[in-house]
Amino acid sequence: MADDVLSQSEIDKLLSALSDGTVSAEEVKADEEQKKIKTYDFKRPDKFSKDQIRTLFMLHESFSRLLNTYLSTHLRTLVNVEVASVEQLTYQEFVQSLANPSVISILAVPPLKGNIILEVNTEIAFAFIDRVFGGEGKTGIKPRVLTEIEEVVMKRFIDTAMGHLKEAWSNVVEFRPSLEATESNPQFTQIVPPSDMVVIVTIQMKVGDVEGMMNICIPYLVLEPVMSKLTTTFWVASSVSKDDDPEQVKILQKKIERTEVPFVVQLGSVDITINEFLTLGFGDVLQMDAKVNDNLLCMVGHKPKFYCRPGTSGKKMAVQITKIINEGDEDTDE
């Protein structure tokens, strides 16, 4: 009642009831005191504040974006990865909520103590494996334990996920995640006592037409040394300072400079029939459409970027750039 705003007519009715004796002042006071009582379950103490839960949500939103980019590129299909919820439960409640079998990975995160769990729904796991093997990602496979070959494929997914998780947490703590064990039965993954509080990050995943969940279980024991850093103020300040760090800019520039891209020079093209192609033999000559004085097209990756002239540099074949193709580029320096 203390938080509600009463209208003038409600105030008049209340004063009238008090004056008539219909409602006593003691009843109003007792009712107000009763509403101040807050239920607290000592078996499930709240270890994480709302601000800390919000920070964990933001951290794993970054993780979801990184994982979404990797899966879209690697699987070459429509992928959607986003954080569905972040909540605190007892470890026993988390284990009981998992399906059996599941793809469960137990990770060590030194220098932080203890382990965390990365659990992937079998539907998403089989969709990932099917796409890696060249399928469409549509699985009607009943939940079962992975084979040895399937475990190797999923280990590649877990290794990549650990790298993105490390990057997402880098503003809070620099840990080195490593895979300690894999399990299919949730009952065999006792990393903390059943009554200990854990934070569960539930991530909604969609690979093609297949939807499923991925859960990250982080015990309070693991996060206790960095609890003071799990605030939105600290996380945002760290992100801004890291983005403006000249050392980070230099590291990023070096990585870009070391990136390898294919550089292909097209000498020309010719159209032939299938029958002519089948009858080709050693010593046959094909006349292409390019002339001796024509500029040749240079492809960087799959995009045309330069025109050039063929020649030699010492004893090696070489090309000389004659023109830059700026079409399609944004903010290209001349």
Image (cartoon, rainbow, N blue to C red):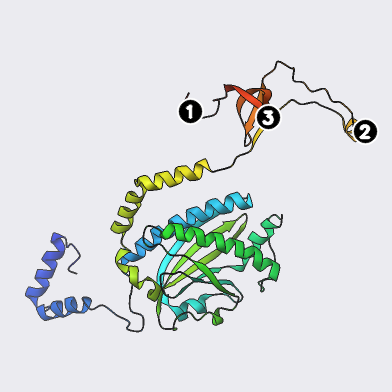
Q: Is residue 273 visible?
A: yes
Residue 69 sits above or below residue 334 on the image: below
Hey, which residue is sitting farthest top in the picture? Answer: 293
Q: What is the three-letter code of the residue carrying label 1?
A: Thr
The Cα–Cα distance between marks 1 and 3, rounded to whole angstroms, is 22 Å
Q: In this view, does 90 lie above or below 253?
A: below
Q: Quadrant of residue 199?
A: bottom left
Residue position for label 1: 332
Categorize mark 1 by other alpha carbons within 10 Å: few (<14), some (14-19), many (20+): few
Observer-side mark, 2 or 3, equals 3
Mark toward the start of the polypeptide (2 vs 3) = 3
The first of marks 1 and 3 along the sequence is 3
Q: What residue type is labelled 2?
A: Thr
Q: Between 169 and 60, which is closer to the camera in this rendering? A: 169
The quarter of the picture where residue 33 lies is bottom left
Inspect the image, locate mark 3, and give the three-letter code of the amino acid beneath it.
Val
> What residue is rendered at 61% in x and 52% in y?
74
The one nearer the camera, 190 or 89, is 190
Work out whether 318 lies above or below 238: above
Please state if 16 lies on the left or on the right of 68 as rendered.
Answer: left
The label on residue 265 is 3
Q: Where is residue 248 in the image (x, y as percent from the top left)?
A: 40, 48
Residue 289: x %, y % from top left: 77, 21
Q: Is residue 138 visible?
A: no
> How far across and down, in percent of the image, does residue 250 sit?
41, 44
The residue labelled by disc 2 is: 279
Q: Are marks 2 and 3 in contact (CB under 8 Å)?
A: no
Label 3: few (<14), some (14–19) or many (≥20) C-alpha neighbours in 10 Å: some
At mark 3, the secondary structure is strand
Q: Sort mark 2 into few (<14), some (14-19) or many (20+) by Cα contacts within 10 Å.
A: few
SS at circle 2: loop
- Which numbered dot is residue 11? none
